[in-house]
Image: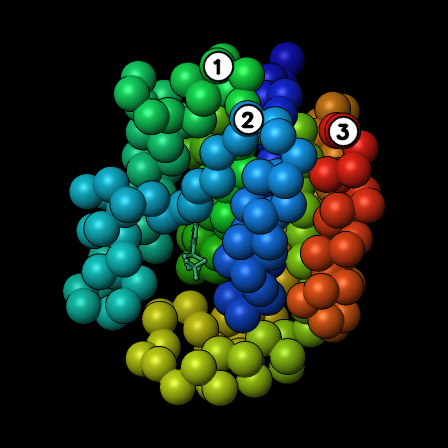
Amino acid sequence: MTKILKNFWVLEGLDGAGTTTQLKKIDKGLSETGKAYMITAEPTASETGRIIRRVLSGEFSVPQSTVARLFSADRDNHLYNPENGIIKNINEGKIVVSDRYFFSSLAYQSIGFDFDTVMLINSSFPYPEYVIYIDTPVDDCIKRIDSRGQEKEIYEKYEYQVKVKEGYEKCFKTLPEGCTLIRIDGSLSREEIYEEIKNKLINKIL
Ligand code: TMP
């Protein structure tokens, strides 16, 4: 049976969709509820996460199959680290919210590698209780990425993001019972997006 990790929420979206902005807003929103919580992100700040960041920046290149396994190793530590892992925090009664999780691997690493194999590599990990998907048009994402004026990461290209979007749709078709998809129109303003997250999720746990 597929395991669902209660009180675990994840944010997903294309590059430039605004997941990091929403994570900050959720952080503020949850802090006002008085509930115990932790916010986190993948790739993590661990040593494995650092190697991943170097790959994402284009500093060195490895096959997509290797990238998939690096993300999976980082995720394993993210979940199971006995000192600061997601499971430990959930067992202490916290709500844990992560900016990205294995849906990102399914959407991104299945381009140039086999979807079913990426699924297999991630098959031991529990599903979150909620997936908040910020569904932003590719054009908007690319405009935002361009307007940052920063060095682009390897996946921050129009054609790639079109495929990532298709990958997300594919993996959301097979969510198990108990894992709820909250799809939010990413063309709304950041305030409106947060308002939806608040109404559909944060207000419900109060
Ligand atoms: P971000 O920190 O801006 O969200 O960037 C993380 C990048 O890593 C983004 O392009 C998505 C990508 N990614 C994967 O390709 N696979 C994964 O499993 C995760 C968590 C992220």
Q: Secondary structure at mark 1?
A: loop
Q: Position of residue 35 (x, y in %)?
A: 61, 27
Please name whichever residue, 119 or 16, is drawn nearer the observer in this view of the structure.
16
Q: Amino acid at mark 1?
A: Glu
Ligand 1 quadrant? Answer: bottom left
Q: Which mark is residue 92?
A: 1
In-front residue for pair 175/142: 142
- Name which residue lies at 77% across and 55% down: 195
- Structural distance between the alpha carbons of marks 1 and 2: 9 Å
Answer few, some or many: residues within 10 Å of disc 2's Cα (few below 14, many 20 plus, some between 14 and 19).
some
Q: Which mark is residue 206?
A: 3
Is residue 38 shown above or below 12?
above
| Secondary structure found at label 3 | loop
Q: What amino acid type is highlighted by mark number 3?
A: Leu
Q: CB under 8 Å between callouts 1 and 2?
A: yes
Is residue 110 or residue 98 the one in the foreground?
98
Q: CA distance from mark 3 to mark 1?
A: 18 Å
Mark 2 or 3, nearer chain start: 2
Badge nearest the viewer, 3 or 1: 3
Where does label 2 land, which residue? 36
Instruction: Give the image location of residue 55, x and y in percent.
Output: 25, 60
- Could you classify mark 3 by the number of other residues whose Cα lies within 10 Å: few (under 14), some (14-19), or many (20 or more)? few
Return the disc, 1 or 2, that comes first in the chain's sequence.
2
Q: Quadrant of residue 206?
A: top right
Give the answer, above or below, for where 104 lies relative to 186. Answer: above
